[in-house]
Image (cartoon, rainbow, N blue to C red):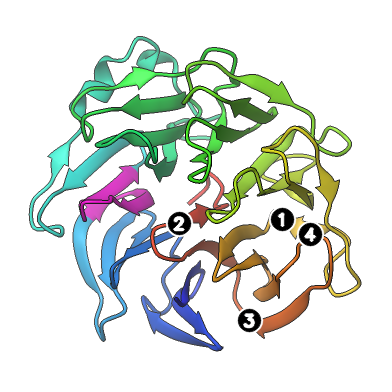
Amino acid sequence: MPLLLGTTNGVWRLNGTAEQIGLANRKAVHVADRDGTIVAAVPKNGLYTTGAGSDERVWEGDARASAIGPDGSFFVGTEPAMLFRSDDRGATWTRCSQIDQLPTRSTWYFPPPPHEPHVRSIDFLPDVALSVLVGIEVGGVLLSRDRGENWAEMNAGVYVDVHQVRPDVAAPGRLLAATGNGLYLSEDNAVSWQAITVGGGEGYAVGVAFNPDRAGEVLIATGDRPPGLNARVFHSLDGGHSWTQIVHPTLPNRYARVPVLLFAEGSAWIMTDTGQVYRTDDPRAGWSLLAELGTPIHAASAGGSPSSVNYGFA
């Protein structure tokens, strides 16, 4: 299955070689794909379907995150923080308005102007049918169990500046949240959280990628300051309880910005803000440089497993 990459210069497909397949000269900060359908979020512009020889905007607005549900529904997350769902491939949309009624909604914010919170990640719990899992910067973790009709804040023990929240699909119940104050682990589908120390204790965690084929294997990208600068990549085999820094002569010692991480096609992937794509079959062994796109990479997906490290600035 090919990888789909969201970049400053549109959407690319990586399948042996890299080729641009849509949204040329547009910044795609999030991509998702399922069963041949590709959607991409373009900030201050909208959500597009792409990759079939043409780009079609199916939702207009400030799109910051995207996903395709197990049932084929489209989801787009926005600034200001809101989620919209389409059950007809973007022809019509439902606003998940109950989010506005959540107890802490009036306190959500983003430090720089215009101080609007936004959706950073959208995912689905593998063991809860109809679930939608959302990360808000700055607002926390949200969970719906009915496709977005009703919502709960799941912030017991987690720092609410959430950059990504992801489930371990091979170990239902386990989640990791990457936040502006480090990494947090849940073993009970976000009912409770505990802080996890990574490496030297870098406080700015952004990228998270679980291996869907191996329970407990995960990559994390952390920086030493916002929005994820001077970053390192770490690897865990026990669900995030212990970590080893990923170092190899082929890889940068430090990344100027946090890279995009993904497990797909039986391999681990690191994709950088300078356009390099690295691949390995064993994260703690050798890595190879597979492609150089010449444009910053913000997001990647492979059959419904999205990963994005786009920061809050459009």
Instruction: Identify the residue under disc 1.
Output: 257
Magenta span of residues: 60-77
Determine if residue 34 is in view: yes
Query: Which residue position holds label 3?
Result: 294
Reading the image, the residue beneath label 2 is 305
Mark nearer the N terminus (4 vs 2):
4
Please tell me in which quadrant of the rendered image residue 283 appears: bottom right
Q: Looking at the image, is mark 4 or mark 2 nearer the viewer?
A: 2
* Mark 2 vs mark 1, CA separation in Å: 21 Å
Residues at circles 3 and 1 in contact by the CB criterion of under 8 Å: no
Q: Is residue 80 visible?
A: no
Residue at 52% across / 61% down in the picture? 299
Of the numbered discs in the image, which one, if any, rests on residue 25?
none
Q: Position of residue 26 (x, y in %)?
A: 41, 71
Element type where label 2 sits in the image: loop
Q: Which residue is mark 4?
A: 255
Give the alpha-carbon distance from disc 3 to disc 1, as whole Å.
16 Å
